[in-house]
Amino acid sequence: MPNKTEAQVVLRLDKITKTFGALTANDAISLTLHKGEVIALLGENGAGKTTLMNILFGQYTADSGSVEVMGSALLPGNPRAALDAGVGMVHQHFTLAENMTVLENVTLGTRPLWAPGLDRAAARARIVQLAQDFKLSVEPDARISTLTVGERQRVEILKALYRDARILILDEPTAVLTPQETTDLFETLRKAIALGLSIIFISHKLHEVMAISDRVVILRHGKVVHEGPTSGTDRHDLAARMVGGEVNTPTAAPGVPGAPLLSLRGVTTPDRGSAPGLKSLEFSLYAGQITGLAGVSGNGQAALADLVGGMIQPAKGALMLAGADVLHWSPRAAVHAGIARIPEDRHKTGTIADFDLSENAILETYKDPPFSRRGWMNWRAAREFASRIITSYDVRCPGPGTRIRLLSGGNMQKLILGRVIEGSPQIILANQPVRGLDIGAVNYVHSQLLAARDRGAAVLLISEDLDEIMALSDVIHVISEGRLSPPFARGSMSPADLGVWMTGHGYGEEAAHAS
Amino acid sequence: MRLEPIANPSLTRTLTPPALAIATTVIIASLLAMLAGANPFAVLGLILKGAFGSKFALLETLNRATPLIFTGLAVAVAFRARLWNIGAEAQLYAGALVVAILGAGLLNWPAVLLLPTMAILAMVAGAVLLLIPALLKVRLGVDEVVTTLLINFIFLLFISMLLEGVLKDPMGMGWPKSARLIDEARLPRIVDGLRLHWGFGLALIASVIVWIISARTTLGYEMRAVGLNRNAAEFAGIPVGRVLIKTALLSGGLAALAGFSEVAGLKGNLTLDLSPGFGYTGIIVAMLALLNPLGVIAAALFVAGIFVGADSMSRAIGVPTYLADIMLATALLLMVVAILLTRFRVVRE
C-alpha cells in the first residue's frame, strides 16, 4: 500500500458546488486522490456522487470550485479535456455502440474520423496487450450486442485504459455484476493499482467498499460528512454515517399469512438478450404477507415483474389468481384482477412526464367510471381523485394540474403509490419501490406496504437491496438465472446464507433432490 | 452552452420567442426583397394587402386555407400520437379520386344525400390508404415515415394513370383531367355571391370536433398518452397498437377531406395539379400550430395568407413568389427554435 503522505497527488477537487434549481447537489466538496490509491465514494441515492463525478469528467460544469489533475487545472465542462488529462470514466449505464465491435468501440473517438488506412493491427495489438496486463478477457472482434453485461463493462474499462487513463472512475460498477464477475473486476482493479493508476469507486455496497478501498469518503445531501481510512472503520459505522444516524426504519412485525392469492405453476418465459427468463417457477403470494425477492440485478426479476404485472404471458405453465387459471392476461387484466403495480422505472414506465397529476392518476383506470363513461372523459372526477391522493399520500406539489415532470422522485412515487393502493388492492407488486428515494420517502413507501399487508394484501417486493428485503419480508425467495429458491422464513437466513443462493449455488442440489 | 428545462415558463417567456420568430422572418423577407431590388416595406405591405386587404383577397385566403386546415389537422392528429404521417398528399388525392368518380354522374342523387356519401367514402379511402402503413408499423415495425412518403409518389402516378386512361374527360380536349362533377355534387357557397364554399365551414367544424376528441374523449387521452410515452401507456394497459390504428384512420380521413373539399367545392374536377403540396404544407401548418387542433385554423390562415399575398405582390411589383416559400421555411425553422426557447433556457458555460 502506498504511503499516503508521500504519494503524488493526482487529483484535487476544491470546493465544488453545483445546484440544480433549488437542489444543491454538491455543496463545497473537496477531495484529493493520490497515486495508486482507491477512494470509495459512498452515499445514498441522491447524495451527489454521480453529479460530482460528472463534474470531474466535464459533463457538468460546477457553479464554483475547481478541478486539478496532475497538478494542472482542468478545463471545466469539457469531457475531451478530462480524457486528455487521463481521467477515464466507466458509467453506470454503458456508453457503447451496440452494433460495433469491441475494437471499434475502444478506438472510437481516439483518432480523426477521416484518418486514412486504419491502423487496426496496431490498435488490436495494443488492446490484446492491455487485456493481458489488466486481466480483462474480451474478444476484440466480438460485436457489443453479443456480449454479457460483465463483458461490456470490461470493454468500458479497456476504453479508458486505451486512452492512457491514470484515474479511473467507476460508477456503481458492481450493481449489474454477479459475485464471480465482481471478483474478476476487483482483480483487474488491483492490477491497475499495482501499475500506478488511481481509482474512485462509487458504490453503496459496503462489503465491497471494505474489500477494495484505501479511503472512504461519504456524501450526504451534497456534503462530505466523513472522510477517513477504510481500515479504521467497519460496515455498521459506515452505514450509520451514510444515513446520518436517522435510521428509523418502520418496524415490521411478522405478518399473518392467509390464502394464496396468486400462484405460478411451472411458469417458463423466454430469455431476453443477456437477461434470463423464468425457468419453471413454482411460487405463491399469500394474503397478509410480504414476499421478498432477492437477487443480483438481471437474474429474471424483470421477467417475473412483467409476468405478474401483465406485460408478458407464460410461455409454459400457468398463472393462477385465487385458485383459478388465468386465460387472458394483459396489463389491463392485471389491473382489473386487483394487482397494484409499482413499476421499476417510475419515469419511463410509471408516469407520463408531460401529463399532469390528474392525467397520471387515472392512467390505469381511465376507461372505468367515474373517470370516463361511453368514451367521454370526466376530468372533474380525475382531478378529485388526484386531489385525494395528493392529500392522503402527502404528495408535495402545487396542485393536480401540475405536470408530473416537475415533481421529485419521492413525490412521483407517492402519486404512483396512491394511484394503485387507493383501490385497496389484493395484490401489490412493488418492483424496486424505493430506488433513488431519500430516506423519508423510503420510510413512507415501506410503511404503506406494511399497512397494505396488515390489511390483508399479498405483497411481492422485488429489490436488489438485501437489507430492504430482509427488513420487510415475511418470506424471502432468491432468484438466480431465472430459477427460484425455496421460501425462507423471516430470520431463518443470514445475508451470507442468502448470498450463497444469489450466486447460483443451492439450486443444483435441489434439482438433484428432485430427480 | 447547454439547455436547462424551465419549470414554469412565465407568460412573457411563452410569448416572446414566437413573436421574435415572426419578427425575424419579416426582417429576412425584407432583406430578400431588397436583394430583388424592391422596397421591402412595399413588398410586405403588398403581401399583407394581397392576403387580407380586400374582400376578394380575404376570401381567396380562406379558400386557400381550407385544404390546409384539413391536412394540418391530419398531421396534428397523427403527430400527437407519434405516428409520423408524411402521406397526407396521397390521402388528399384518395379523397379527391372518390369524389371525381362518384360525383361526375355515377350517382344521380340529390345533393343532401350525395355530398355526405362522397365525404364519408372519401374519408374511408384516405383512412384505408394510411391504414396500410399503420398496420405495417404496428405489426412488423416498418418505419411509417418511409412508407407514407413513398406512397405519395406511387399514388400520384396512379392518379396520373387514371387521368390519362379510364377517368379522362372525353370532352377535355385531350387534357389529363376528369369529367366535371354534376351540380348536385358541388359544395354550395356559404353566402350567395361570395366565392367561399362550405368546405371552409366543414374545416372549422372538423377542427372543433378533433379538438373535442383530443381533449374530452378516452380516445384523445389514449392518443396523447401513446404519443408522450409509449412505454408508460403500454404498462398502464392502453392498447398502443389499436390506438395507433385508430389515429391512422382519423388522420387519413381528415387529409382525404381536403381532397373532397377541393374537388367538390373549388375545382369541380380532378387534375394532377389539384394540390400544390397541401399534404406537405400541412406538416408546416401542424407544427406552427404546436399540434393543437384549434391552432391549426390560425396557422393555416397564416400560411395561406403568405401564399396568396405573395402571389398578389408578385403580380404587382415582380418580386418572385418564391419569397413565400422562403418566408414559410424561415418561419417554421425559427418557430421550432422559439418553441425550444419557451421550454428551455440556454445556460452559457
Image (tube, coloured by chain):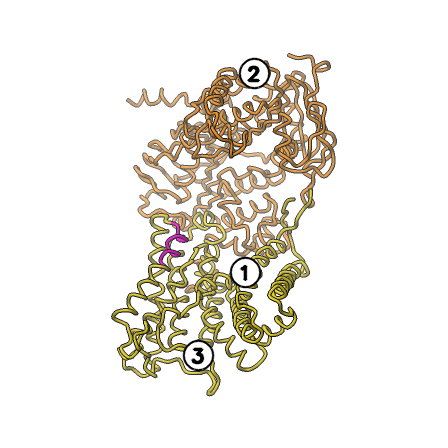
Chain colours: A orange, B yellow
Kind of residue at badge 2: Arg
- Whole-angstrom CA distance, mark 2 to mark 3, is 80 Å
* Residue marked by disc 1: B329
Check disc 2 and report its element: helix, strand or loop. helix
Residue at the farthest front position:
B37
- Whole-angstrom CA distance, mark 3 to mark 1, is 30 Å
- Write the residue at 39% across / 34% down: A273
From the image, state whether disc 2 or disc 1 is nearer to you.
Answer: 1
Residue B339, picture quadrant: bottom right
Kind of residue at badge 1: Ala
* Residue marked by disc 3: B198
Magenta includes B109? no
Kindly identify which chain the residue marked by label 3 belongs to: B
Kindly identify which chain the residue marked by label 2 belongs to: A
Q: Provide the residue span drawn in magenta.
A: B143-152
- Write the residue at 43% across / 35% down: A99
Label 1 neighbourhood size at 10 Å, few (<14), some (14-19), many (20+)?
some
Q: Which mark is residue A190?
A: 2
Check disc 1 and report its element: helix, strand or loop. helix
